[in-house]
Amino acid sequence: MSGVAEPLFSRSQLDDRVTELAREMESWFGEDGLPPILIAVLKGSTMFLADLFRRISRDVSVDFMSISAYSARPGSGVVQILKDVESDLTGRDVVIVEDIVDTGLTLNYLRRSLGARHPRTLRAVTLLDKSVRRIVPVELELSGFDTPDVFVVGYGLDFQGLYRNVPDILAVRDVARLVNDPALLVGELYRR
Ligand code: IMP
Ligand code: MG
């Protein structure tokens, strides 16, 4: 590769770990009551959600939320709900499914917002945990990989909307070059 990005987690590592996460999550829930609801945060979590919940061998519901960082105060942790869940969460076992927890501001907001809707239990699972970047402490029941402080793309994660459908996770070593030319990696990552 060009040296701009290099492999961090391969598709087979992701596959194995996602299977383990699904096993672990199955142990969270009893058989009583309505099925647990997995709430994926658009758009980065969609690939993780798809692989995760097809490996959960019990009935689960899924729902989606879309949020954006509130642009007037970036980094403030104030986010806007662009699309809310459709389910009533009262009395339900709820799991937030995240692609990556970085500063923790997003998950912190989601836990407060969803926690206020009277779920029976509220948990969070993330594929990647950039724990060294945390600026607010946040509860996180399960994570796939502790991740170094590098910008990552692939397996749902994007740079300016690009690279979400790359099957592996790559670390961007030279973010400045990508900022300068966002499509720089297209040629080497996709066969035409
Ligand atoms: P937080 O609120 O700082 O924890 O950030 C959460 C969101 O930032 C994630 O859901 C991603 O959308 C985005 N994000 C953080 N780090 C990365 C990265 O390395 N690659 C792509 N997106 C990221
Ligand atoms: Mg996200």
Image (cartoon, grey):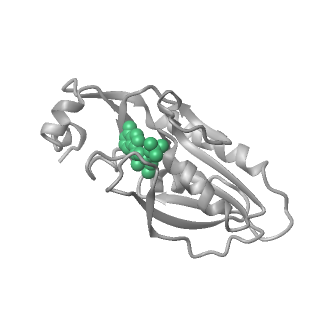
Please name the residue shown 34% across and 50% down the image: 165
- What residue sits 56% from the left and 56% below the top? 110
- The percent coordinates of residue 49 (x first, y second) are 53, 55
Q: Which of 25 and 65 lies nearest the eye of the viewer? A: 65
Q: Nearer the viewer, residue 148 or 58?
A: 148
- Relative horizontal placement of residue 180, taking residue 6 as reference (left or right): left
Mark yes or no: residue 167 visible.
Answer: no
Q: Quadrant of ligand 1?
A: top left
x then y, percent, for residue 59:
72, 65
Rendered view: 123 above or below 182: below
Say above or below: 35 vs 29: below
Q: Residue 27 at x, y = what percent?
A: 79, 48
- Taking depth in this image into account, of 101 and 26 the one nearest to the observer is 101
**Relative to residue 155, is residue 91 drawn left or right?**
right
Q: Measuring 32% from the left and 56% from the top, which residue is drawn there?
A: 72
Q: Indicate the position of residue 149 as horizontal and vertical percent values.
A: 41, 27
How many numbered marks does the figure carry?
Answer: 0
In this view, 61 is above or below 168? below
Residue 85 in view in this figure: yes
- Residue at 52% over, 56% down: 50
